[in-house]
Image (cartoon, helix red, strand yellow):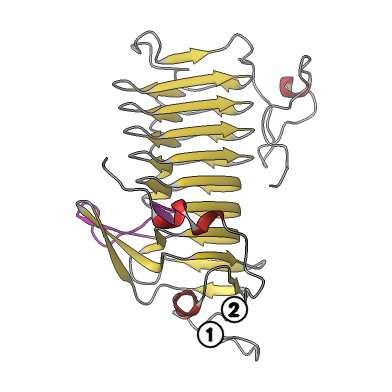
Amino acid sequence: MKHALPLLLAGSLIAGTPAAAETIQVCPEGSQTQSCDFTGNDAVQQAVDRAADGDVIRLAPGRYVPSSYRDVPFEDIVARGYVVIRDKRLAIEGSDGTVLDGKDGIPAIAFVLENADVTFRNLDISDFRWGEEEDDIYDGHGIFAIDSRVRASDIVMRGIVKMALTGRGRTLIDASALRLLDGHLGIWLEEAAHAHVRDSVIAGGDSAGIATYDDSTLHLFNSVVANNTDDGVYAADGSTILVVRSVIAGNAPYGINAEKNGRVTVRESAMHANAAPANAALAPGQLAIDEDVVQADPMLDAQWRPKPGSPLLARDGSGQPIGLTGERP
């Protein structure tokens, strides 16, 4: 077995939140708030270090810039994290106006998780960048999870120069209301990672919207994958992707692509205006597009929702909507 079952996944992750859980208040550099437990660009890491299992770290509005880092070795790489969370079960919550801004600070990954269980809510993670484009130091990512459990909702990641949301090892991801915009690659899974993603938008990347490798799996529901320039959805090796009630539009060179034994299934969805709907060279069994997939223009507005008259609004049968629903977990 390549990866042992993480200790937290095997045990404490399934426990309830302790009654004595604490809320730790974090404030940005220059804050005049008197109720801050930690203040400054290193305050988030300081709060993580102090936190016990079940604690909530609440980030006050403002700009947090990476000014230091910690390195997490993994296989043949080193993940360089602005905030590193190991062996803990925490919640990290932002406020309206909370931004982790990587464009002026030290090149790093916004969050690196190792054998952790972390709930992320209401965060803006922007412009994290690399120091060297091609080396063994991984920086320029958004959330990079190794053998961990990630629950994420209402997260915006914009301008991330590598991968916005990454699952490695035996990571489990449950995400809703993501906006992964104008970066490099939206969601990247390897090894035996699994992600369940809903009500999300992955758009404007200069690589794939979603890419899975090894034996990883991804289930995508009521989401939009649009205008990515190196495939909308891509499955390689023995990985599998299931797309249900989602929109795949405007991607190039393919809306859907796969290599080796990668497999993609699309059901009750819409595909439109991709440079090509799918790679015609795919072997039998690699791609399944059900007959109920809408091929017409989905007519989405600037918020990626169907406009009046959209064919996504006139469906019979189950009545389940295609595209964003606005639901929250």
Q: Residue at x 76, y 19 (%)?
A: 318
Quick check: can you spot residue 218? yes
Q: Residue at x 61, y 32 (%)?
A: 221
Give the labeled residue for mark 2.
24
Image location of residue 192, percent across then percent down: 37, 38
Image location of residue 109, percent across then percent down: 38, 61
Give the labeled residue for mark 1.
38
Magenta portion: prevailing SS class: loop
Q: Tell me the crowding category of disc 2: few under 14, some 14 to 19, or many 20 or more residues within 10 angstroms, Cα based.
A: many
| Amino acid, disc 1 | Phe
Image location of residue 319, percent across then percent down: 78, 22
Going from the N terminus, do you reach mark 1 or mark 2 first? 2
Secondary structure under tag 2 reads strand
Label at residue 21: none
Is residue 26 depicted above or below 16 in this figure? below
Image position of 19 (left or right of 174): right
Is residue 47 depicted above or below 317 in this figure? below
Give the quadrant of residue 306: top right
Magenta stretch: includes residue 137: yes
Q: Tell me the crowding category of disc 1: few under 14, some 14 to 19, or many 20 or more residues within 10 angstroms, Cα based.
A: some
**The N terminus lies in quadrant:** top left
Image location of residue 79, percent across then percent down: 30, 59
Image position of 1 (left or right of 143): left
Mark whose residue sits in front, 1 or 2: 2
In depth, the one of 39 and 72 nearer the eye is 72
The magenta segment is: 129-148
Mark 1 and mark 2 in contact? Answer it, CB < 8 Å: yes
Is residue 130 depicted above or below 241 in this figure? below
Alpha carbon distance from label 1 to label 2? 8 Å
Q: Residue at x 44, y 23 (%)?
A: 256
| Amino acid, disc 2 | Ile
